[in-house]
Image (tube, grey):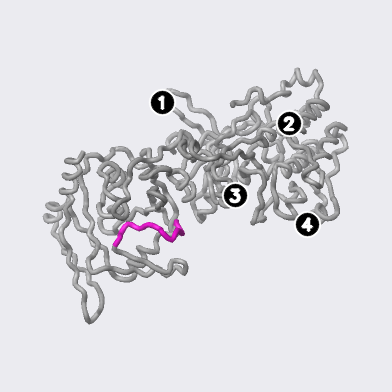
Amino acid sequence: MADNKSTMLAEAKPRKVVSRRSKSQGAIPSARKKLTSKEQEKSYTEVDIAVKAEEEKTRHLISSYSDDNDPNRSYSDDKIGYSNQKTGMAMARVQKNRLCLKRVKDFNGGSTASLDDEPFYHGYVSREEAERCVSKDGEFMLRKALVNGKESYIVTVRWETEKLHLKIQQNRAEKLYWLRTFCFNKIQDLIRFHLQVGVPVYRENVILKSYVEREQWQLYHEQIALGDVLGCGEFGLVYKGTLTVGLFTKPQEVAVKTLKSNSLTSDDRVTFLREANVMLKLQHRNVIRLYGVAVQKEPIMIVMEIASGGTLLHKVKKESLDVSIKRKYCYHTVSGMKYLEKEQASIINWENYQSNISQSFLSSTLITKQQTEKSTTTKLSVIHRDLAARNCLVGVGDTCKISDFGLSLLGRLHREKNMTRVPVRWLAPETLMSATYSSKSDVWSYGVLMFEVFSNGRQPYENIKNLKLLRMKVIYENLRLEPPSDMPPEDRNIMTMCFETDPAKRPSFADLKALYKVHCTTPVITKMLGWLNPEKVAVA
């Protein structure tokens, strides 16, 4: 390995580039020698790429990486300095010697795989998530990020106490990729060269030693085939499609949510993928299952279980349902919510998670095994925050399943800073007053869902069109939904309990499920429909 390393470095020996400074103009002119085509072929394995020293280009090079606000933010060239980052005035200081890169043309350790197929490439991952993944010296991952509205490739690597984010640069002329000294035609060759040879990627000591591997749920776009459009979500279209898991397995039908790439911010991507963050570890008969996400390229996709029966709201509106069927759907929903209410996910460093909760995605699964073994974990429940008949789907066996976790969070209690575009008609008084969410605010929303089901899909508070007026009446005038006239007394009692003003006095979902078992079942219905204990078939 030592001989190999010395040979590779010898082959990449650079020519010296001399730059002269004009005293009168105070500028650094371009002194690059123009090679003929024959000369280029002769010395193609050791091309010197000089970076222009004009202020505009150096300022662009310094200020181009905004993915990271760390004062120790990392750049590939040690010869370029910067200052006054808080005001955004990144002024470049260029030394007399111009930057000289060494091209490595034929790297024997290079991979024949495309970048998307490389195990160290994770696609779109936020800075916070990447930092949680790298846990030891030299461990890294390659990810994609939006930098000033443009896609860029970032190497996130841990070294001692630092977690560095190195943007892979590309020169304009030859389109070669580089981090510090050596440049390559392909990004994957750049990464594997530094990984195998051990050449520093930053300063004189930071090297790449090992990488964070992709998880099974990180799907390739080639595994997904899109079919008919099922609908349109907030961030893009929802398709009926198929997912192929292996060469010898039959493709399975799935629903695919896509993220439209036009005019979307980084926060939009985080919000879109928050649903995957919550769903990744949830497996229950009454919760829509997530199969994986594809984030290597556009469009970003979330692949989940398909429910052919449509939404619960559509079902109760369009079909004349017996009371026992309506009760069954309510029971399925409360069973799924009881599962979510239980402590489902292990999160490291609860205080950090609370502060970054709205800026992270895929957190519960991107925690490495080493971190889990060494850290103290906190168990958290799932707060849905948007429980309604429109967000429940009817699947195989006429089973009702909770879906649409786009607003969901992991935690015990959460105070939202931005209360725009929220479902006011389904929100509890404490949420309307102080933007506070908890499992007990989900219980209130469940009471509203019961109203929807037993009223055949009527809009809650349908006589009040002004949402500000509705909010005031719920908070200060104790306005509550009245149970529909044909709602059985037992169900009326359960619905009324959900509308207690004090969250502490509301029942938990475990309490509600117990009440259903005692008061809302008959032996005939239980035997005929088989819905009494849906958790028995849940996957642990």
Q: CA distance from mark 4 to mark 2?
A: 30 Å
* Pointer 4 with pointer 1, Cβ within 8 A: no
Instruction: Look at the numbered disc 3 and give the secondary structure of its residue.
Output: helix
Instruction: Look at the numbered disc 2 and give the secondary structure of its residue.
Output: helix
Which mark is nearer the camera, 3 or 2?
A: 3
Q: CA distance from mark 1 to mark 2?
A: 38 Å
Q: Quadrant of residue 515?
A: top right
Mark on residue 247? 1
Name the foreground residue: 289 vs 58: 58
Q: CA distance from mark 3 to mark 2?
A: 34 Å
Q: Visible in this render: residue 149?
A: no
Sooner in the amino-acid sequence: mark 4 or mark 1 = 1
Q: Residue at x 70, y 51 (%)?
A: 436
The picture places residue 37, in percent across and down from the top left corner, at 14, 56
Sooner in the amino-acid sequence: mark 4 or mark 3 = 3
Q: Which residue is mark 2?
A: 329
Mark on residue 466? 4
Q: Amino acid at mark 4?
A: Asn
The picture places residue 431, in percent across and down from the top left corner, at 73, 51
The picture places residue 333, in percent across and down from the top left corner, at 71, 33
Mark on residue 163? none
Instruction: Look at the numbered disc 4 and give the secondary structure of its residue.
Output: loop
Structural crowding at the residue carrying mark 4, measured as other residues with C-alpha within 10 Å and reported as few (<14), some (14–19) or many (≥20): few
Q: CA distance from mark 4 to mark 3?
A: 33 Å
Sooner in the amino-acid sequence: mark 4 or mark 2 = 2
Structural crowding at the residue carrying mark 1, measured as other residues with C-alpha within 10 Å and reported as few (<14), some (14–19) or many (≥20): few
Q: Quadrant of residue 93?
A: bottom left
Q: Which residues are magenta?
A: 67-78
Name the foreground residue: 12 vs 371: 371
